[in-house]
Image (tube, rainbow, N blue to C red):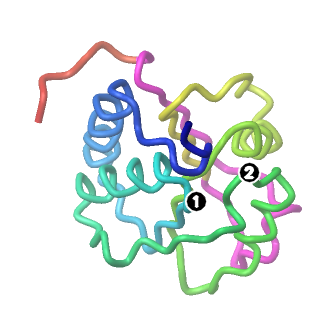
Amino acid sequence: MLADKDRPLKDRGMRDAPKMGRRLAKRDLHPDLILSSPARRALATAEIIAKKLDYPESKIVVRDRLYEAEADDLLDVVSELDDGLHTVMLFGHNPGLFELAHRFSSEITRLPTCAVVEITFPMKSWSDLDAAKPTKVEFDYPKKQKDEAPG
């Protein structure tokens, strides 16, 4: 039996990750940095979405601290980011990602597999994230919209 960290992306993930990547590309998202858990399925998802966003796979940063991280651990990782970065994507796991998303938006009551939460903050430094109040929250997940044509 494979260790949790080594589990591959399932067929559903292989179908849903490109779909979510296309949706992000349609919103003209251009990340300055993509951070991923070292877990095989999280990194595979990051790579698939990065490709749809024309983000170089070689620039995905793998952080061990994102594996099985709780919300406070995720905040710690983000609060240490360079303030020159404006758009950062995290690829990790529940329940930590859900807890973090829910902390910033009580309207997010679940975080399905391959869900995307986009949060905009009015801050100048990542170190201020814990106390920041979002100005915008977008929440999308594979079954939220009707299936699109493959692409």
C-alpha distance separating marks 2 and 1? 8 Å
Q: Position of residue 82 (x, y in %)?
A: 62, 86
Q: Position of residue 54 (x, y in %)?
A: 22, 64
Judging from the image, what secondary structure is the residue with disc 2 in? loop
Residue type pointed to by label 1: Ser
- Say which label, 2 or 1, has the lower sequence index: 1
Q: Is 56 or 39 nearer to us in this picture?
A: 39
In the rendered view, tell whether residue 52 sits above or below residue 103: below
Judging by the rendered image, the residue that carries numbered circle 2 is: 68
Judging by the rendered image, the residue that carries numbered circle 1 is: 37
In the rendered view, tell whether residue 146 sits above or below residue 123: above
Q: Position of residue 63 (x, y in %)?
A: 61, 71
Asked if disc 2 and disc 1 are in contact, CB closer than 8 Å, the reply is no
Please report the residue visible at 71 percent of the width from the left and 51 percent of the height from the top. 134
Q: As drawn, is 80 to the left or to the right of 14?
A: right
Picture quarter with the C terminus: top left
Picture quarter with the N terminus: top right
The image quadrant of residue 90 is: bottom right
Please report the residue visible at 53 percent of the width from the left and 29 percent of the height from the top. 113
Residue 56 tag number: none
First to last magenta residue range: 120-144
Q: Position of residue 33 (x, y in %)?
A: 47, 72
